[in-house]
Structure formats: C-alpha cells, structure tokens
Image (cartoon, rainbow, N blue to C red):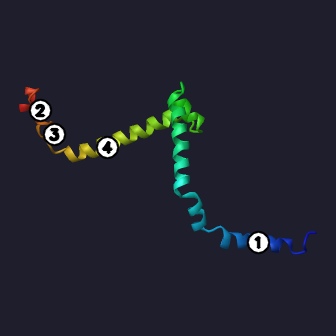
Amino acid sequence: MIPKRQDELAKQLGKLVVDHLITPGSIQSKVINDASIQNMKIFVQAEVKKALSTQKSTAQLLDQLGMKNSSFTLEQRLQTFILGKYEIWSEENMSKSLKDIVPPHLQQKSPRLDS
C-alpha cells in the first residue's frame, strides 16, 4: 500500500536519518578509526607498488588517472614556479654585486670576481 502522504513521509524519514542517525560524528567515528586508517594505508601502499612496478611512463599513469595533458601542465606549473622564484631572488639581489652573491668557495675558483 502506498500512503496518500508518501511525499511528506519520505521527507520526514529523510530528515530523521540526516538529523539523528547520520551525524558528522557518526561518520567520523566510522571512517576515522585505527582499523580504517590501517586499511587505507595498506590499500595505498599496494596501489603505489603497482604503479611503481609498471612499465608505463609517468604521463601514461597520469592520463590513466584522468589527468590529460598532465606532462604539459606539470611542465607549465614547474616553469611558472621556477620563474617566480627567480624573479623574487633577482629582486632581492638586484642591488648586490656579483662578489656579494657568489659563495666564497666559488670565488676562489674564479679570479675574475675580484673586479
């Protein structure tokens, strides 16, 4: 039998479940416990071992994970990061002489830094 107020009953049942049975604390206690964490570690270690023992390239593995054009994106991010670091370094050292920047042990190897 389908009750006349099925929609209202479904909403009230959903509200009961969300408000009283499924709480953030109950989810956390189920997911974040020693056994779950240990199982996750074992799973991740097994997956990493599989990935490391494959003959696929890094780009192929990333593509398999749904990260298309990952090598290009990674190269772009790395280039942006390096250029950013270089710009910061060059701004900090712009007013310094080369002799102030080069470490003493390298200065000894190059007599031209005396000028």
Q: Residue furthest front?
A: 35
Apparent side of residue 2 relative to residue 107 in the rendered image (left or right): right
Kind of residue at badge 3: Ile
Chain-order first, disc 2 or disc 1: 1
Give the residue drawn at x 16%, y 45%: 95
Q: Which mark is residue 101?
A: 3
Front of the two marks 2 and 1: 1
* Distance Cα–Cα, label 4 vs label 1: 56 Å
Is residue 56 rendered to the left or right of residue 83? right
User: Marks 2/1: CA distance?
Assistant: 75 Å
Which residue carries the number 1 mark?
13
Instruction: Say what amino acid the circle numbered 1 marks.
Output: Leu
- The residue that label 2 is drawn on is 105
Where in the figure is residue 53, as x and y percent of width and height?
52, 28
Residue ID at (53%, 43%): 42
Q: Which badge, 4 or 1, is on the more N-terminal residue?
A: 1
Q: Badge 2: how crowded within 10 Å, few (<14), some, or many (20+)?
A: few
Depth order, front residue of 32/66: 32
Mark with earlier residue (4, 2): 4
Q: Earlier in the sequence, mark 4 or mark 3?
A: 4
In this rendered view, identify the residue nearer to me: 68 or 44: 44
Q: Which residue is mark 4?
A: 85
